[in-house]
Amino acid sequence: MIKPKHVILFLSFFVLISFGLVSESMGQDVSGEELLKDASGDKLKAVINSYEGDKAVLVNVWATWCAPCIEEFPYIVDLQQKYEDDLHVVFISADFPAQRDKALEFLQEQNVNWTTYFKTGKDQPFIEALSDDWSGALPFTKILNKNGEVVASWEQGAEYKKFERFTKKAINN
């Protein structure tokens, strides 16, 4: 006999799949269009805030032409996989519009299978929406705890140990 709560769970899951909400949160593969979505600074601020109370968030702004960005990228992908229950990584490509396909190809090569973002709009409002302390230099990383409080932020590349130290602090804070 099918219990009513199982029917409700099934229908809820079906609705979430229909609206594309499950693929992001469950780490399932997403299409190229869903893998790299256009986003303004304000939209990204809303995305980051949406995890408050649920998960720590690591925000990383990168570009394919930025050597330190490319070097640290696998570290962040590894952390997303290692701490997937407690951490959500928000990758934001700051590539120029003509390089969007290159950014998408790079994400696929790095086995990123969750929605990431492509910067739109003017630079200064974008920078200000993400951080008061960011000059606009790349790469830029900001890590927030589950309460939405900034645990760490920095410009320039970093080693795996630094990412993991602040990720653990954000998760356990």
Image (cartoon, rainbow, N blue to C red):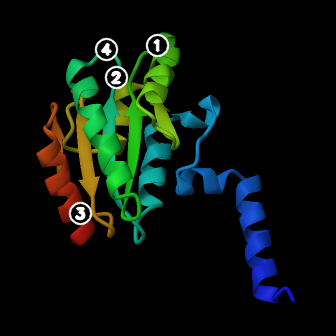
Tell me the distance, in whole angstroms, between the alpha carbons under discs 2 and 4. Answer: 5 Å
- Give the residue at mark 2: 63
Closest to the observer, 14 or 148: 14
Image quarter hosting the N terminus: bottom right
- Mark 1 vs 2, N-terminal side: 2
- Give the residue at mark 4: 65
Mark 4 in CB contact with mark 1 (< 8 angstroms): yes
Which image quarter: residue 49? bottom left
Element at label 2? loop
- Mark 4 vs 1, N-terminal side: 4
Coordinates of residue 96 in the picture (x, y in percent): 43, 15
For the point 33% across and 58% down, the residue is 83
Up-down relation of residue 44 to residue 87 (above or below): above
Element at label 3? helix
Q: Amino acid at mark 4?
A: Trp
Element at label 4? loop
Closest to the observer, 120 or 82: 82
Q: Residue furthest top?
A: 98
Q: Amino acid at mark 2?
A: Ala
- Mark 3 vs 2, N-terminal side: 2
Mark 1 in CB contact with mark 2 (< 8 angstroms): yes
* Mark 2 nearby-residue class (10 Å; few <14, some 14–19, many ≥20): many
